[in-house]
Each structure stands twice: as C-alpha cells, then as structure tokens.
RNA sequence: GGGCGCGUAGCUCAGCGGGAGAGCACUACGUUGACAUCGUAGGGGUCACUGGUUCGAUCCCAGUCGCGCCCACCA
C-alpha cells in the first residue's frame, strides 16, 4: 500500500541501508565478473570538509553515469575517497589551537601537532562521506581511500623516487612564490593575480661620478629599492645609451650599482629606466642572471625587512644608513612608507602617480606573495606534459565539451617546473635524506637511505667500513648523521596519482588491471590544471596509458547573481539544507536538469521546489496505478497491444527511453532530465492516465486488463528511466509496486535499463494527437466562452469523415469525460448561436445559445483568423519567391505547402463560423 | 596583453539555419475518486545592437555595446 505522501526523510535512510546491505555498489560483483568495466574515480573532497553545492553537483552527475551504466549491465567501480588537503587542513587545526588558546604548532612541535591533525581527521573525516551517501552517491564504499593511507603514501614515495631516478625531480635554489603568512612556498597555480589600486613612485637615482645627473626609475614597490643591484635601460633607447656602463649610487644605502642594457626594459614604461631587484622579482632575477648581478635579500620569511648582519646595510657611507637599518623587522608596507619619506626628504622623489596593477596573492592566505630565494624541490613537468598533450591530440583522452582541450593545450605547452615542496607538516614528507656534507639520498625507505648513505660515504673514504657498520647498528647515531628533509609535498602531488594509487599501484592488483584506464572523469574546470593535467602526466609516466578515456568538464555552481559562492560573501546555498527541505531526489534532479554544457549554473531554490513537486507527481501516479489495479504481468508483451491509447503510450515511452539514453551517453544531462520529465509529467500523467480513466471504469474487460498491464509496464520503465536521477523515490516505488505484482528479482539499482523495441506506432500516434488536440480545443473554447467548468455541454461535428467517425466511436467516452461533454452528435449544419472551431477536416460547434457572448466569440474567432491570414501571407511570400523555390530543399518546400494548405482550410472554416455568427446576430 | 563564454518571456535558463520553448512568477476558472507539492485555459519575447553570408538568420560570419571567467612578468 502506497502512503499518501512521499517522505524523503523516512525513506532515504531505509533505501540507503538496503543498497548497502545488498552490496549493490560493490565493484566486481560476481554476476558481473564477465561484464565490461566502467570506472570513475571521485574527485576526492577534503577529508575534513563538508558537502557544498559544487560537490553535490559534481557527484550527482557522476552518480547518474554510474547508475546508468550499472543498469546497462556494466561492472561499475565508482572509487570514493578523500584528500588530506595539506594547507587547508593544517590551517584549520592551527586556527582551532588559537581559538582554544592552546600553544601554536611550533610550540607543540611537529609530532604533537600532527597528532592533533590526525585527531581532527578522525573526528571530522566521516562527515563528507556520510553527506555523499545522503545524496545517494553509489560509490563502492568498501574501497574508500584517503591520500595519506598507507597504500597511497607508498605510491607517493614510489613515484617520487622514480621521477627522481629519471632526473625529473630535482632540488634547486631559485625564486619561488613565497607565502609570508603561511611561511611556505606555493606553486604558480596557487597564486592569484588580484587587481589593486596602488601607486607608481618615481625616484631619482644620482650617478656615482656626477651626482648632478640623475636617472629616474619608477616602482610600485619602493621598499625593494634597498635590494636594487642595477638599473636597466633598453639597449636601443637613445636617451640612456650614454649611461650604460656607468654606476649609480643607490640612495639610502650608498651602494654602487651599474646601469645595464637589457631588452627587458621597456622604453614606453615609466621613465624607460627600471630598477633591478634580482632577489625579489622574477623578471629582475632573470636580468640579474644575464648580467651577473648580485642578489641582495631584504626580507625575512615573514616579509619583514631583514637588514641586520647584512654587510650591504651595515657598511657604507650613506647619510640615511642609520635610518635604513632602523627599518629592520618592519613589515613591508610600513617600510614602504618610510622609504618613500626618506627619498622625499632627500629630494629624490620626483612624483607619485595613481596606478592600478595586479598583485600576486596566495590563494589560501590572501596576502601578497613574495618572490623569495629558497631551496625547493621541483618536478620537471615538460617531458611529462608532452605525453599528455599527445594523448589528447591522439584522442586517447577526449574532453567534453571539446573546447576545453584548447585550454588544456595552452597550459601544457607553456608549462613551468612544478614546485612540489611545502614548508608544512601535514602531508607526505619528502623521501630525501641529507648527509653531513649535504649530499642527498632519495630512497623509498629510511633503511634504504641509511644503507645507500653509508655505502656512499665509505666509497668516498669519508667513513671507514668498520665505523659505518657500527653506525648501521645504532639508530640514534644514524639519525644524527643522516637528516630527513622536513618538507612535505604539495597536496596535488598525491592527488595526481589518484586514478591508479586508489587501485593499488604500485602493486599489480587485479583492480588496476581491470579498471585502469578509467572510463570518465567528471570535474569542474577550476581544477583542470591543478588536478586533471597532472593526473594525465603522472598516469602516462607510471602506467604508460592515460588515466581516463573521457573528461567531462562541468560548470561551476554560482549564486543567483552569478558570483562564485563563498562563505565570506554569505551567498552560499547549503546543499544540506536543500536535502533536508526537499529531499535528495529533488536536489539531484534540479542539478542534472540545469547541467547544460558550457554555462555556469545559477541555482535557485524555486527550481528545486519545482522538481520536488515532480517527485510528488510520480508518487501520485503510482498511487493511481495501485488504486486502479495496474499490476505488472509477467506475460505482458508490449509488441502485442491492441488499444490505441496503449500502443501510443508505449511508443511515447520508447521515444523517451531513446532520448534519455542518448543524452546521458553524450553527457547532456539536462536533456536527459528534460526528456524524462516531459514524458512522465506531460505525456504519462497529463494525458495517458487521464485517457485511461474511462477505460478503467468502463465495461470493456479485455481493454481494461490490457490497459492495466500497459500502465504498470510503462510505469516500470519510468522508474528505471528516472532512477539515475531520483534513486530513492524510484527504488522505494519499485518495492512498493512489488507488493501487488509478481516478485521482482531485486533492487532497482541493479535492474536492467529499459530497451527500445520498435514500439513507436505512427497510426496510434496520429489518432491520439487528434484526440488530444480536439480535447484541448474544446477546453480552450469553453474557457474563453466562460462556460462553467462543471457544466456539461453537447458537441456537434459538421463534416466529419468516416475515419473521424470511427475514431469518435472509439474515444467517445474519453472525449466526453475529458472535455466535459453531455453528448456528441454529427450534423450537416452547426446549430445557431454556437461557438465554432476547427477540428481537422470537420468544424466543431458547441451550441451555447443564450450562454454565448457574441462579441467575445467574434473577437476570439477574429483573432484566430488574423493569425492564420498572417501565416498564409508569410508562406505565400516564400512560395512566391523564385529563389526559394529553386534553392530550398524539396522537403522544405513541401512542408511549407502542406502548412499553407492546413492553414487555409482552417481559415475557411473560421471565416464560415464568423459568417454564421454575423447572421445569428 | 592573450584566450574562453554569455546577453532569448518579469526571474532562472533551454534551444541554435526553415513553425519562438521550459520551470518559477502572473491572470482567470476549478476540490471531475492519483495528485491544490494539483488541474484547465491564458497573458507575456522586433531572441543586445549593426552589418554580412543565405532563397531564408534568434541560430553562421564580422564588428559594436554590456557582463562574466581563465591565463600572463610588466616597472
């Protein structure tokens, strides 16, 4: 017995439990051992995070694919898991410490701090997984992985060592993007260019040999002038050619710096001369390399002025040197003011201009990043990128929509070395050990590193063999002798291995053999570079094969104004609230219905409400079927159905099946959802069920039985079609409808996807379209003539041919009921004072003598006539155009002719009706 | 500076070479034995603008205006 209303809150947990108990989502289920594999790896959410709307969207689409393919009989693996999210998670725990007024991480020490992070991971780690389950995600939860699992950590070390062995990972000292708040290096991708309103300061630098001559430089960062080691001018810039090779005495420090000629300098910008600070600017660094300039560092790790103990500032004879030294320890922005002040007092500040420019910021910390000279680990991604590019060019991996390929190409073609070391604690510690002389040993384990190191130092006569053997037996001495690199790897380093590390690599597991390469990756474009490109690169490197065949790039979910949702803006739509209020099916259906390719989604709750109502509609349709004894029959053969209505609905259903199937296959989720929606509501509920009412309450037993069986059969298809989008509701109804019919084999989640059987019947289609149109026309006229909704009126048909008469006989009861007619009669003339309209070849009349408002009727008919005249004129214009007749395809010409004919026939009838109306008046 | 995308009904969005669509909102009517989380009927759009291609353009091309995003080292 189906309850009166569907209650997601009660049903969802029960259905989830049933899926889980049956192991419905487990990959490699026995009965599918021989089935083709279909694999998707989930974009792993932050382990300590909470489900946001983007996750809901991303996972809904993946789940649609997985459920669809599972129903199509594939052996589906949807690999779930979570990411340790290095910086993000570490920041959260640090903030917690601050809020709880506990000692900060440095005071706690690495070991203790990591304990706290793990505790936080254990405490909050299940949250997002449970939220995904609530959404209905059909992952193989028994295979859940975490990027810092033992297995995945092993994979990280393995590939690090292999890349190092291949010369593709190396350590280097160069400028990096340094985050002075988080105190770590970050990669280029983690830097965001933010437009800020700043200033351009013009400083005069006096020449050393003639202080009356000054060269003007412009800068947005006055404080860095303390680290200037040259002034560059363009070699072709005539204004400055005579100065090249001469020295400038840098104000405030008294340092002598050369004027060099370098094409980096742009004569159009500023004064044409540019100050060069190789230690604090990427471009200047390059210039410095070219001219052998020294690097003068003026910042500490927190980007405060660092001037003490630096001979550049402790010696020299500039009168302001003392004041400059006093800036030591001052943050860069305060120092900027002070430097400008000093220059102004010296009369060397020429002018200040307002200047809008972009400033690099750390995407996590939000503070301006500082190019800073440090030792870091880099991956030489260039050769890896080549292979990734080739794979996409060859079509071994395909992007949907295709235009993302270009973005992918552009980035990979211009790829820079990837800085992978982070000065954090939460993450995979780099498997590198340093000997006392700084020699590096990159090995899989500490034991191997120790062994290699001892062998190395023995070989180089630094250790005696006896001493080495002794040390090998003494862990404490070893630990003091060989120090492990303290840094950890970029979070994305482990994410880059996700498609194969989760399958057991580097072990040769059966899962790896079966499910790699995976079938599809579903993700948003914002992690195309961070993640997708890197999975491609490492996947090809270790597996020699792409990690996924297809990459479906979906839109970003934005707020109703199109802005990216963020907590700070307060425009976040919380999917959990939507789940509570409308249920998982409604949210999922909404997201799928809005997933048109190539455009961002602006989510509104009104839409969710609308699709919640859709769920209610389905529920009530099921109740209708139940009340009317629409029970499934095992002997039902949809190809041998007699009733027109039934043949018609089976054909319409089949069209929906074909449309939904092809739409999902081509990742057009919105079209799939739309096709299902239109069929279920617009065809099945609005028309089929209404049309069956007279049959189900009528006398024709055979037709009644057939109709019941057909309704049940179609409803089964509906449940299956909708299952990928609305798994809970459909699964629930699947079992509720099981109570009355023959027993089902099991869960809908494991049932078969509906098959097309060539059931479209053009004749039945014609007939039903005629009936539907007739009913709509009658209703329309009734409404416009203000016939009371409950009133039964007679219908008179004039000029109905044999075919129409036959149809009329078939559908008489239906017509009377749906159009609220008292009787239908055939006549040669329409009764006086009736409202008329066109019904195919016939003219229909509703005798409304006395009820009819002549003026209103005249207006109604006049309006329709005008429309028809307009259409005929438009078509005539086309048909009268010789060019059109000559060049347009024949079908198009025929179509236009047909349409003209139909419109003309209609127009004639309307004209007659108007004439009759005039006579009546 | 380079690239991508978008401007279609009041709102949120589909469509994309030959008849302008959906949901929500709006108007009128309606408790007809599935459903008022509903039904029936209806109003509402020179498909941003200007040119071009075409027999034919909301759709293709070029340009203009407006909006958004991504990438980039510009003093």
Image: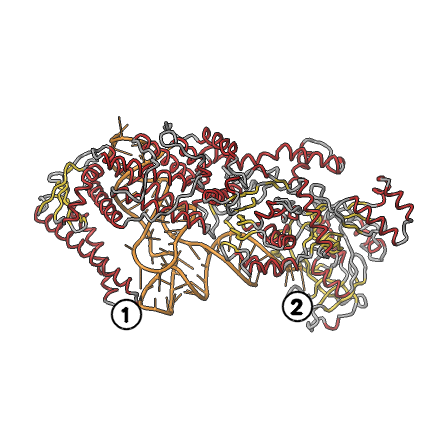
Labels 1, 2: front one: 1
The colour scheme of the drawn protein is: secondary structure
Tags 1 and 2 both on a single chain: yes
Viewport quadrant of the N terminus of chain A? top left
Task: Give the class, few, some or many, for how many residues have Cα within 10 Å of label 2's Cα (few <14, many ≥20).
Answer: some
Please state the horizontal and vertical placement of residue A99, each as a whole percent of the image: 67, 33
The numbered dot on residue A886 is 1
Residue A913 vertical position relative to residue A98 in the rendered view, above or below: below
Element type at marker 1? helix
Give x and y (percent) for residue A189.
Answer: 63, 52
> Residue at 52% of width from left, 55% of height from top?
A399
Q: Quadrant of residue A427?
A: top right
**Is residue B74 shown above or below A913?**
below
The residue that disc 2 covers is A267
Q: Secondary structure at mark 2?
A: loop
- Let me know if residue A921 appears in the view: no
| In the foreground, A334 or A432 | A432
Q: Position of residue A80 (x, y in %)?
A: 57, 41
Residue A399, relative to residue A787: is it above or below?
Answer: below
Q: Position of residue A766 (x, y in %)?
A: 24, 49
Identify the chain of the residue marked 2, using the numbered disc in the image.
Answer: A
């Amino acid at each position: 017995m189906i309850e009166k209303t569907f209650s997601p809150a009660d049903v969802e947990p029960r259905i989830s439990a049933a899926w889980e108990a049956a192991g419905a989502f487990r990959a490699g289920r026995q009965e599918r051992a021989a089935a083709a594999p279909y694999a998707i790896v989930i974009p792993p959410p932050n382990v300590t995070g909470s489900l946001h709307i983007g996750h809901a969207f991303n996972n809904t689409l993946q789940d649609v694919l997985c459920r669809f393919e599972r129903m199509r009989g594939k052996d589906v693996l949807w690999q779930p898991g979570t990411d340790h999210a290095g910086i993000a998670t570490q920041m959260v725990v640090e903030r917690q410490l601050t809020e709880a007024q506990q000692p900060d991480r440095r005071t706690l020490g690495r070991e203790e701090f990591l304990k706290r992070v793990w505790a936080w991971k254990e405490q909050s780690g299940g949250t997002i997984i449970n939220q995904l389950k609530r959404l209905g995600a059909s992952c193989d939860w028994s295979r859940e992985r975490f990027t810092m699992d033992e297995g995945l950590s092993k994979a990280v070390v393995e590939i690090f060592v292999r890349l190092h062995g291949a010369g593709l990972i190396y350590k280097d000292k160069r400028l990096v993007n340094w985050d002075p708040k988080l105190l770590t290096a970050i990669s280029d991708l983690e830097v965001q260019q933010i437009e800020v309103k700043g200033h351009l300061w013009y400083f005069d630098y006096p020449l050393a040999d003639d202080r009356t001559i000054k060269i003007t430089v412009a800068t947005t960062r006055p404080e860095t002038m303390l680290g200037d080691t040259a002034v560059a001018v363009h070699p072709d810039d005539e204004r400055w050619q005579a100065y090249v090779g001469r020295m400038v005495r840098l104000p405030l420090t008294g340092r002598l710096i050369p004027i060099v000629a370098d094409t980096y300098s742009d004569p159009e910008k500023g004064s044409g001369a540019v100050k060069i600070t190789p230690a604090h600017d990427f471009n200047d660094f390059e210039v410095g390399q070219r001219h052998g300039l020294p690097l003068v560092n003026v910042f500490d790790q927190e980007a405060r002025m660092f001037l003490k103990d630096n001979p550049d500032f402790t010696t020299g004879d500039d009168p302001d040197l003392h004041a400059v030294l006093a800036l030591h320890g001052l943050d860069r922005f305060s120092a900027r003011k002070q430097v400008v002040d000093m220059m102004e007092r010296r009369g060397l500040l020429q002018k200040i201009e307002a200047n809008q420019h972009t400033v690099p910021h750390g995407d996590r910390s939000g503070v301006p990043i500082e190019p800073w000279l440090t030792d870091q680990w880099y991956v030489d991604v260039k050769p890896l990128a080549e292979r990734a590019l080739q794979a996409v060019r060859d079509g071994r991996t395909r992007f949907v929509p295709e235009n993302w390929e270009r973005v992918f190409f552009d980035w990979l073609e211009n790829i820079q070395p990837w800085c992978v070391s982070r000065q954090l604690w939460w993450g995979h510690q780099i498997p590198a050990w340093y000997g006392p002389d700084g020699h590096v040993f990159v090995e899989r384990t500490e034991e191997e590193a120790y062994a290699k190191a001892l062998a190395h130092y023995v070989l180089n006569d630094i250790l005696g063999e006896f001493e080495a053997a002794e040390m090998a037996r003494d862990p404490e001495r070893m630990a003091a002798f060989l120090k492990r690199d303290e840094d950890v790897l970029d979070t994305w380093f482990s994410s880059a291995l996700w498609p194969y590390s989760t399958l057991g690599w580097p072990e040769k597991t059966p899962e790896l053999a079966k499910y790699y390469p995976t079938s599809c990756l579903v993700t948003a474009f914002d992690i195309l570079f961070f993640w997708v490109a890197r999975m491609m690169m490492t996947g090809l490197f270790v597996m020699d094969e792409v990690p996924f065949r297809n990459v479906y790039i979906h839109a970003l979910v934005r707020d109703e104004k199109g802005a990216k949702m963020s907590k700070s803006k307060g425009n976040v739509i919380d999917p959990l609230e939507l789940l509570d209020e409308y249920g998982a099916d409604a949210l999922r259906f909404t997201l799928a219905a809005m997933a048109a390719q190539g455009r961002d989604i602006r989510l509104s709750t009104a839409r969710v409400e609308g699709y919640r109502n859709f769920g209610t509609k389905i529920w009530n349709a099921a109740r209708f079927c139940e009340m009317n004894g629409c029970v499934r029959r095992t002997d039902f053969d949809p190809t041998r159905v007699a009733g027109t209505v039934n043949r018609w609905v089976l054909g319409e259903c089949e069209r929906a099946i074909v449309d939904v199937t092809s739409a999902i296959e081509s990742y057009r989720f919105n079209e799939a959802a739309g096709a299902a929606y239109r069929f279920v509501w617009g065809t099945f509920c609005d028309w089929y069920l209404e049309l069956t009412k007279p049959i189900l309450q009528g006398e024709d037993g055979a037709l009644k039985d057939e109709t019941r069986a057909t309704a049940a059969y179609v409803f089964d298809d509906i449940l299956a079609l909708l299952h990928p989008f609305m798994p809970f509701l459909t699964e629930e109804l699947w079992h509720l409808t099981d109570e009355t019919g023959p027993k089902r084999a099991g869960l809908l989640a494991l049932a078969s996807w509906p098959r097309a059987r060539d059931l479209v019947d053009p004749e039945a289609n014609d007939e039903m379209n005629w009936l539907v149109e007739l009913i709509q026309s009658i209703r329309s006229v009734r409404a416009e003539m203000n016939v009371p909704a409950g009133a039964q009126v007679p219908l008179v048909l004039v000029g109905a041919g044999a075919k129409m008469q036959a149809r009329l006989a078939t559908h008489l009861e239906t017509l009377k009921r749906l159009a609220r007619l008292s009787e239908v009669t055939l006549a040669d003339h329409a009764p006086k004072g009736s409202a008329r309209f066109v019904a195919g070849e016939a003219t229909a009349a509703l005798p409304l003598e006395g009820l009819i408002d002549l003026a209103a009727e005249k207006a109604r008919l006049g309006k329709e006539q005008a429309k028809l005249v307009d259409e005929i004129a438009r078509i005539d214009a086309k048909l009268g155009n010789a060019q059109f007749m000559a060049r347009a395809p024949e079908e198009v010409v025929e179509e236009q002719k047909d349409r003209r004919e139909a419109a003309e026939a209609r127009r004639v009838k309307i004209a007659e009706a108007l004439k009759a109306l005039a006579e009546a008046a």
